[in-house]
Amino acid sequence: MSQECEHNCESCQEDCDERSFLAPMNAHSHVKKVIGIVSGKGGVGKSSITSLLTVLKQREGYKVAVLDGDITGPSIAKAFGVEGTQLYSNGQEIIPAQTAFGTKIISTNLLLDNPEEPVVWRGPILAGMVKQFWSDVLWGEIDYMFVDMPPGTGDVPLTVFQSLPIDGIVIVTSPQELVGMIVEKAVNMARKMNIPILGIVENMSYVECPSCGQKIYVFGKSHLNDIADKYDLKVLGKLPLDSELTKLSDLGMIEDYQADWLDELQEALKDI
Ligand code: ADP
């Protein structure tokens, strides 16, 4: 650190050990673990997995929150049934929306007059918004905060990575993606930032036949295990396509979702 250090890392060009872009947590909040959910591209189920991980931890009795960092495609508020909730401020901080089960949520959808309107902000504004969600929201005491990260591995997710004190990430893929390449990018990004990768989830892996229970691999054979071996990642789960999940997300009732395979996912999350 130089002797003239003004402790403003954002405008400083010096390459220094003390460099930090972390946005400050507001004085009245304490978040024990921050977990980022990332994906190589949109539409693979990143927000759905973020929601399910949150629901599973909430069912274990933890105090949980979701910071919806997917500013241009926010879907968390809708899945948890808080879309349209009027947000309040105590004059200094924003009070997050709260679900019937006590999950705290902040999302762009809650701040726009018309949630259907597309968000056409540039990168720095998107990243700044996520920082504000972290710093200006009165989160209170939280055991696990799940951050639905902006999709991809570009500038916006990178800035968010640098801004929040993320303890670990979960990578979400789907079998029809160019999985190897996309996972490699996400792994490289996390490793560059020194952020542990908690595991990888394959979403939409198969469909279960409602009559005989047979698994049908509609997108072909999964290559997840090979990729996980290659990058030394833990497979947290291979999740089915389930119309009930879509239905409950659309109805804002994801906290009511039940499925046999959730137990396996919950077991895999024990180490988190
Ligand atoms: P992303 O956050 O990666 O853009 P979403 O989680 O928003 O993706 O999912 C996109 C759509 O696919 C949503 O309508 C969601 O309900 C649906 N979906 C995601 N995962 C599943 C699944 N395993 N089974 C059924 N529908 C799913």
Image (cartoon, grey):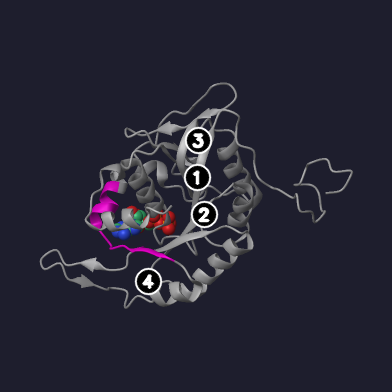
**Answer yes or no: do the residues labelled 4 and 2 have beta carbons within 8 Å?**
no
Q: Which residue is mark 1?
A: 33
Residue 55 in the image: x percent, y percent? 34, 45
Compared with 135, 249 (above or below) is: below
| Residue type for callout 4 | Pro
Between the C-alphas of marks 2 and 1, the distance is: 9 Å
Q: Nearer the viewer, residue 185 or 197?
A: 197
**Answer yes or no: do the residues labelled 3 and 4 have beta carbons within 8 Å?**
no
Q: Nearer the viewer, mark 4 or mark 2?
A: 2
Q: Residues within 10 Å of mark 4 (few under 14, many from 20)?
A: many
Q: Nearer the viewer, residue 107 or 230?
A: 230
Q: Which residue is mark 3?
A: 111
Q: Residue at x 50, y 30 (%)?
A: 140
Mark 1 or mark 3: name the one nearer the start of the chain: 1
**Answer yes or no: do the residues labelled 1 and 3 have beta carbons within 8 Å?**
no
Q: Which residue is mark 2?
A: 168
- The segment highlighted magenta reads 234-248
Residue 246 in the image: x percent, y percent? 29, 53
| Residue type for callout 1 | Lys
Label 4 CB, ligand 1: below 8 Å? no
Q: Residues within 10 Å of mark 2 (few under 14, many from 20)?
A: some
